[in-house]
Image (cartoon, rainbow, N blue to C red):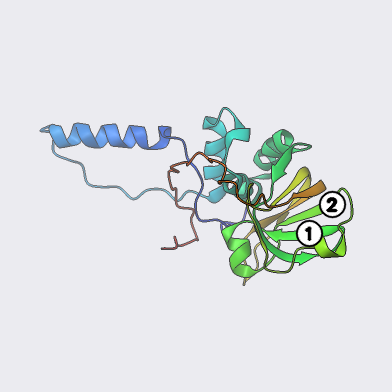
Amino acid sequence: MNAKCGAATILMSAVFTLGAGMAAAQQDGGTIPRPKPQPKPSVTAAELVHKVLDVTPDLNALALDDKVVILACGDKEDADKLWSVLKDHQTTVPGVVIKATASVIQVAVSADAQNARIADFIVYMKTPLADKDIPAVGFVFKRQPAAELDGTYDSYSQVPATAATPQAVLIVLKNGFIQTEKIGQEDRAVPKRVPQVFYIPGNPQKS
């Protein structure tokens, strides 16, 4: 697995910080001299992904960004483990339209894909769109009550890193459809998550 993986953060369980926090608290209150800090061994993106899968009881509960990271950066066995949960399930596809026809909409969902202006989700529509309904390049799909794009997970493939682009994933969805914007309605309440940011080697965090 190439260490040059696309996304710089993934949602990690609190279990990874709990042990370190307890140890630090015990040291602060004790009298035993602190040992010299030892360099931490390098951890690959694939190893981090494996840890996430180990401590996440419900993979469906992961945020979409985190699912993208796991599919892009995980070893095949781990990526396939997540995919077995996702396949044939419906999802929203929030992101920027890169290209669209009546039958297919290509969307950049992850931050890396949006920055590179390349699609990481390809949605095949269940019914061809009328010309007036084809979204323009640059249009941003969100979640209802804004215009929302939905589809059913069909297949995925990992895209190796190049000199110019990080490792990524291309996700294909079927039975796509658009829910039009609901004018005058308040935004649906979406629970806010407070992710624990875990640095992936080879990707500086963006401020």
Residue 42 locus on image (x, y percent):
45, 51
Quadrant (top left, top right, bottom left, bottom right) of the C terminus: bottom left
- Residue at 66% in and 49% down: 182
The residue tagged 1 is: 105
Q: What element carries label 2?
A: strand
Q: In terms of secondary structure, where does tag 1 sit?
A: strand
> Looking at the image, is mark 1 or mark 2 earlier in the sequence?
1
Q: Residue at x 26, y 33 (%)?
A: 23
Q: Mark 2 points at which residue?
A: 125
Q: Is 84 above or below relative to 170?
A: above
Q: Position of residue 126 (x, y in %)?
A: 87, 48
For the point 62% across and 44% down, the residue is 67
Among all residues in the image, which is located at the extreme top? 57
Q: Given the image, on which type of amino acid does mark 2 rest?
A: Met
Q: Residue 161's x, y, as percent? A: 65, 63
Image quadrant in which you'd find residue 34: top left
Q: Which residue is drawn at 37% across and 37% down?
A: 17
Extreme residue toward the right, this view: 128
